Image (tube, rainbow, N blue to C red):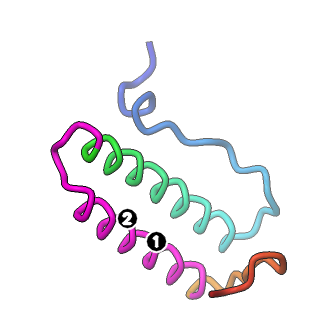
Amino acid sequence: MTNRTDFIQARSRYRGEVKPENLVFNANLQEFSQRVRFISSLETNGKMTPEEAFHQIRSLWKQLKRSRKELGIEPHPFFPEE
């Protein structure tokens, strides 16, 4: 049997262009995804209000955007900045 942490916090293999900034952003993106799943589960089960969930996810989103900018990763040309 595998480690429980590996099962609960599964990571996908990176398949993009291998550059340090891309690898770091990918790790940040996976962490964002994992946290959103936890928050969604808490809200669904009544342990958190929808407003609390929204604010926490919004904060996580801002952190992810900030990390992308700090790493110098350009936005996708089909999805320009807001």
Left or right position of 58 against 73: left
User: Which quadrant is home to the N terminus?
Assistant: top left
Give me the C-alpha separation between circle 2 and circle 1.
6 Å
Query: Which residue: 83% across, 76% down?
Result: 78
Residue most extreme to the front: 50
Residue at left 50%, top 36%?
10
Q: Which mark is residue 80?
A: none
User: Which amino acid type is marked by label 1?
Assistant: Trp
Q: Horizontally, is 79 left or right of 32 in the view? A: right
Residue hosting label 1: 61
How crowded pointer 1 is (Cα within 10 Å; few <14, some 14-19, many 20+) is rated as: some
Image location (x, y in percent) of residue 65: 53, 79
> Decide: marks 2, 1 in contact (CB < 8 A)?
yes
Q: Which residue is mark 2?
A: 57
Tell me the magenta residue range: 44-69
How crowded pointer 2 is (Cα within 10 Å; few <14, some 14-19, many 20+) is rated as some
Which element carries disc 2, helix, strand or loop? helix
Between 24 and 67, the residue placed more toward the observer is: 67
Q: Reply above or below: 43 against 80.
A: above
Tell me where residue 77 sits by quadrant.
bottom right
Q: Which quadrant is the C terminus positioned in?
A: bottom right
Tell which of 39 and 72 is nearer to you: 39
